Amino acid sequence: MINTRIWGAVLPTLMFAGVTGGVHAEEAPRTETRPLLHPLFSDNAVLQRDRKVPIWGWTKPQTNVVVQLDDDKKQTARAGIDGRWTVSIASHRAGGPHSLTILGEGNGEVATRRNLLFGDVWLCGGQSNMAYDLHGANNPQAEIAAADYPEIRLLQVPNAIKAAPISTFETAGAWKACTPQTIEKFSAVGYFFGRKLHHDLKVPIGLIDCSWSGTPGESWVSGPALAAMPDFKPAVDALKRTEEAPQSSPLNNPNAPEVLFNGKIAPLLPGEIKGVIWYQGESNGDNAREAEQYRTLLPILVSDWKAHFGSRTPFYIVQLANFKAPDDVPRDDPWPNVREAQLQTSQRISETHLVVVIDLGEEKNVHFPNKQEAGLRLAESALHHTYGVKGESSGPILRGAKAASGAIHLTFDHARGLSLKGDENHVFAVAGADRQFHWAEPQISGNKVTLRSADVPAPLYARFGWSNNPRASLYNAAGLPASPFGADRGME
């Protein structure tokens, strides 16, 4: 069955392009201005430290290009028949500044880039809660005024909706040093994440803002990967026909499957990055079917990006925050299913980690302003998992559950100082064989929570925070919350 929301996103464009009734128009060849040096390597760029870094650009086919970093030995690359050339710069420690010079032999082309730093490059992807700038955060004017960090560098990838992968982007998307003037329109979550890493690691940090408000996950997946899902294959195939039709109109819908991978991720490849922070999912939780679909879609997205940036690339997922009115009775809302998809993805794919913000949201504001804490939790998780810094970086994690003696007994890891804050009698729920959930009374002892309900004498299933906006949060001594979960399977 075709998802009507997905097909609705791409069909108007295809119909306008003449792709209807099995008749497909021919498309004129695409033109793409391709510079001598890719804009990833503009002035002020951050290059990934401690690894060989690919450098590339375009010139006249079958001609030589000479590349030199500072006073290092010159390297020569020969452009292919498509004009593309590539070299790899040797691994460098963090620091700088450095300069890079590119010379096209025989044609007089020259490109010189200055004030380059070696450090850690992080890709910041997702929809509006990643895209929201510092004006949408707490204390915006003070935060903007204090944002003077010469060794934090910012790159915003221009928005582009494409039917096929493109190889570069407009030079307006050049790197900039972090100042009060350059930071105010940048991702707040990305900035607060990068600021903490820079403060603790004392290395340059490069942040690439690659977000777009309101976009669903399928827009960010490559066509070949997305086509593995039957729900999306018709739209992917139709998009391919649009690209091949020489008289088709430009695409104009960022929600169409694949188009943002083509327009915003593909131009970064094969760039070298340290990792990804990802905040998205709201647009995949409009109904129960989309939320269930996300259980398959999100792992495909993560695996797809890892296939392009490197299988060991760390990927940090921000789980959906609390939003909308709290439930008066236990319900099966779409957003808890999206959150569980995010939780399960982090548990099943290596180097993938969940950052829980279930306590930071607001009932009437999907764009909650406490982006400082969201960025901080992302950074603390990265410092622990990617950089090996000791310390607690996770809230309580469900280890096991058992039904016995008219109760359900839950055991948690990362549970030192386990405590509930909020309306504790309206956040856990249990159900018997009929799977009808009722609120349960929790009792905490050490790392265990025992659940009982007068309405369910023989409970078999348990849920925690299974609501758009849970009424309480479960914390450990580090002040980090547990992820909501739905243990709808039988207890052992």
Image (cartoon, helix red, strand yellow):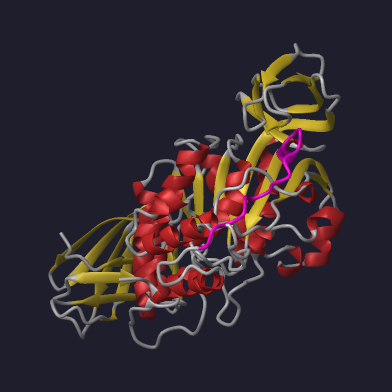
Q: Position of residue 35 (x, y in %)?
A: 75, 38
Q: Which residues are magenta?
A: 25-40
Q: Position of residue 475 (x, y in %)?
A: 46, 62
Q: Position of residue 424 (x, y in %)?
A: 40, 76
Left or right of residue 8: residue 79: right
Visible residue check, residue 124: no
Residue 254 colored in magenta in the image: no
Pick the residue in front: 237 or 318.
Answer: 237
Pick the residue in front: 329 or 236.
Answer: 236
Residue at the top extreme? 73
**Quadrant assignment, res 463:** bottom left
Give the residue displayed 56% in from the left and 48% down from the top. 165
**Quadrant assignment, res 143:** bottom right
Prevalent SS, magenta region: loop
Pick the residue in front: 298 or 63.
Answer: 63
Give the residue displayed 35% in from the left and 56% down from the top. 344
Please tell me whether residue 403 is drawn above or below residue 376 in the rendered image: below
Give the residue displayed 67% in from the left and 29% down from the top. 55
Left or right of residue 388: residue 376: right
Quadrant where the N terminus sits is bottom left
Q: Position of residue 478 (x, y in %)?
A: 51, 54
Please tell me whether residue 106 is drawn above or below residue 199 in the rendered image: above
Left or right of residue 231: residue 383: right
Residue 36 colored in magenta in the image: yes
